[in-house]
Amino acid sequence: MSTDRPDMRISDAERELVVAQLNTAVSEGRLTLAEFEERVDGVLRSRTYGEIEPYVGDLPQKGPMTVPEQIEIRNQASSLKRQGRWTVPRRVLITTRAGNVKLDFTEAVFTSQSVQVQLEARSSSIELVLPRGATADIDSIAPRASSLKQKVPAAYDAAPGQGVVFRISGEVRSSSVRVRYQRRFWRWRW
């Protein structure tokens, strides 16, 4: 991972790409598990491109990994849950029939300050858990015999540039949509 300015700070998403590169090197047999652990610790502590270079300088460089512009989540008569650290593209398409979908964005890495969420739900439950400071706009959802609950500030009520803005639209029939922050009580989070 080289750049013209080694003193430039590296983002969390780029740091995660370097960890993925190290993971690939282990699976190819280029690194031992002990080397992998040592390098991952160093990468996670690094703040600039120059600090990361010693950990990947001796590995073959592949083209830059790109995050897809959108992801599509399909669910039918199942329960689907996404949580932890994951990269969120600009557009998220959710299609569900008689199922439950819960997307937890609290530890996610965002590629932009605005995320478009397109819903198409029938007899389903959709729950979006947003990170603190994020706002949502659910005014473009067309509900039919459905329940919509928003427990976060609306996008037009918050000051610009405060956090990630979720613009949620689509059509839901006989379904429920809930947009909220993570709940906390003592050490528990849900």
Image: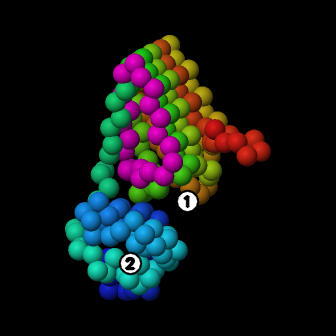
Viewer-proximal residue, 46 or 112? Answer: 46
Label 1: how many Cα within 10 Å (few below 14, some 14–19, many 20+): few
Residue 92 at what x, y percent from top left?
Answer: 38, 41
Q: Residue visible at 31% across and 50% down?
A: 69
Region rendered in magenta: 76-95
Using the image, tell me which numbered label, if any, was put on residue 147. Answer: none
- Kind of residue indicated by mark 2: Tyr
Residue 94 at x, y percent in the picture: 38, 33
Q: CA distance from mark 2 to mark 1?
A: 34 Å
159 versus 57 height, above or below: above
Q: Quadrant of the C terminus?
A: top right
Q: Is residue 80 magenta?
A: yes
Of labels 2 and 1, earlier in sequence is 2
104 and 177: which one is in front?
A: 104
Q: Quadrant of the N terminus?
A: bottom left
Secondary structure found at label 1: loop
Mark toward the viewer: 2 or 1: 2
The image position of residue 59, as x and y in percent, is: 27, 75
Q: Residue furthest right?
A: 186
Q: Is residue 66 magenta?
A: no
Q: Amino acid at mark 1?
A: Gly
The disc label shown at residue 161, or none: 1
> Residue at (40%, 19%) from the top-left corner?
77
Can residue 137 be seen here? The reply is no
Pointer 2 with pointer 1, Cβ within 8 A: no
What is the quadrant of residue 13 in the picture?
bottom left
Determine if residue 5 is in view. yes
Residue visible at 66% across and 42% down in the picture: 189
* Residue receiving disc 2: 55
Judged by its main secondary structure, the magenta piece is strand
Q: Is residue 137 above or below residue 101?
A: below
